[in-house]
Image (cartoon, rainbow, N blue to C red):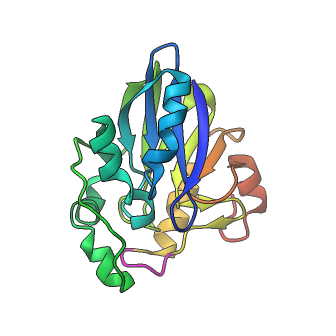
Amino acid sequence: MKLHVLPAGPIQTNAYLLTAPERGEAVLIDAPGEIWAEIQPVLQADGCRLTEVWITHGHWDHTQGAAEVVRGAGAKVRAHPDDRTLIETPQIMEHFMGESLGLEPVAVDHWLQPGEQFESLGTTVEVRHVPGHCPGNVLFNFPSAAAAFVGDALFRRSVGRTDLPGGSFETLARSIREQIYTLPPATRIFPGHGPATTVAEEQEENPYVSG
């Protein structure tokens, strides 16, 4: 399995393209604006077809390009039901932001449940619910690769903002301690913005939520 990190969209949201050339399949984690154009040459180079899009949470910068990706690739979508309104009625976010963002509704094929496990790209993926930044924020944990994709719950030496609708610092801190800091210390954390980090680093050095 290969990992391609592709920051895209107006605020450089991290999209993570996971490809498995030996299987000819790929998965996209989050879909910022204009990501479809970014991933097509990568898919072609790796000889893969995009089969699924996994949404870590429903904020506009993580879903802006999802409808275009689904149309272009015919991919199925996974997301958490607590963000159903944001994903299916994105105009709510445009109203809150006070500007048109060109958002389109996205049809979700599978609603994720906390603790759910499924097979993808030849490995097991574990879903953990990490609300606080956004009600439906989830992380996708790959135990065999010691890697977790956490959306905007946790960043390198920072945490997701909690001043948006549905946000709560108390909830976020609990999510981080109970769902992220309980992963093996060497687990690499891939956030929605900025560079990767590890569980151990954030437990020791994160100024907002200590281990």
At 39% from the left and 43% from the top, the residue drawn is: 54
Q: Is residue 159 left or right of residue 32?
A: right
Q: Nearer the viewer, residue 101 or 204?
A: 101
Image quarter hosting the C terminus? bottom right
Above or below, 137 against 184 in this view is below
At 37% from the left and 41% from the top, the residue drawn is: 53
Task: Determine if residue 191 is in view.
Answer: yes
Task: Determine if residue 182 is in view.
Answer: no
Q: Is residue 37 left or right of residue 143?
A: left
Q: In this view, which residue lies farthest toward the top? A: 22
Bounds of the magenta segment: 162-166
Looking at the picture, how far across and down is residue 156, in whole percent? 70, 59
Q: Nearer the viewer, residue 28 or 48?
A: 48
At 31% from the left and 66% from the top, the residue drawn is: 103
Above or below, 106 against 207 in this view is above
Looking at the picture, how far across and down is residue 133, in whole percent? 47, 68
Looking at the picture, how far across and down is residue 209, in whole percent? 65, 66
Image mark count: 0
Q: Nearer the viewer, residue 24 or 132?
A: 24
Choose top left, top right, bottom left or bottom right for residue 210: bottom right
Choose top left, top right, bottom left or bottom right for residue 61: bottom left
Image quarter hosting the N terminus? top right
Q: Predominant secondary structure in magenta?
A: loop
At 34% from the left and 78% from the top, the residue drawn is: 100
Residue 37 in magenta stretch:
no
Q: In this view, which residue lies farthest toward the bottom? A: 98
Q: Nearer the viewer, residue 69 or 86?
A: 69
